[in-house]
Image (cartoon, grey):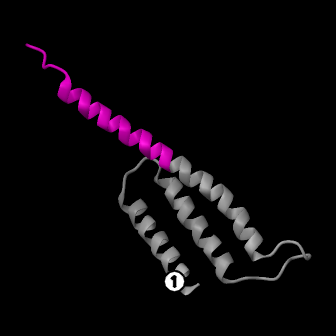
Amino acid sequence: MKVCVVMGVTQLLLWAIWAGVTSHPARYKVWTVVFGGGLALLLEIYDFPPIWGYVDAHAVWHATTVPLTYLWWSFIKEDAVSRTAKLMTRSKDKTEPKKAQ
């Protein structure tokens, strides 16, 4: 458990640093995932008994990972599209013949 917590905190810190120094257009999604992931990690660490006998910390943790996963993969998709567009633009600039003046 301790190793998993250390790895989770390390990953959150690295992504927070990256989101802080980058100018990526979708960095707000990374910040949301980092913040939400930190809160989800707290649910995993500080377990509480079931509320009304139905919902405990682990169930809430599972419920929070669904929207965070969706948001994370939407960031990955947006990043891939952005990087591909930049590469295509660079490639197009290199292959187009220069116009004579």
Residue 37 x, y percent position in the rendering: 59, 67
Compared across the picture, whether 35 is left or right of 101 comes to right
Residue in the image at 43% along x and 39% along y: 81
Q: The disc labelled 1 sits on which kind of residue?
A: Val
Compared across the picture, whether 97 is left or right of 61 comes to left
Total residue callouts = 1
The answer to which image quadrant residue 17 occupies is: bottom left
> According to the image, label 1 marks what residue?
3
Q: Which residues are magenta?
A: 76-101
For disc 1, the neighbor class at 10 Å (few under 14, some 14 to 19, many from 20) is few
* Image quarter of the C terminus: top left
Residue situated furthest top in the rendering: 101
Residue in the image at 64% along x and 71% along y: 40
Please tell me which residue lies in front, 23 or 51: 51
In the rendered image, residue 71 lying in the magenta stretch gets the answer: no
The answer to which image quadrant residue 54 occupies is: bottom right
In the displayed structure, would residue 79 be above or below residue 4?
A: above
Residue situated furthest left in the rendering: 101
Residue 31 x, y percent position in the rendering: 51, 60
Residue 82 x, y percent position in the rendering: 40, 40
Residue in the image at 73% along x and 82% along y: 47
Residue 42 x, y percent position in the rendering: 64, 78
In the rendered image, residue 81 lying in the magenta stretch gets the answer: yes
In the displayed structure, would residue 63 be above or below residue 29?
A: below
Residue in the image at 31% along x and 32% along y: 88
Compared across the picture, whether 15 is left or right of 53 comes to left
User: Magenta-highlighted stretch: main secondary structure?
Assistant: helix
In the displayed structure, would residue 84 be above or below residue 35?
A: above
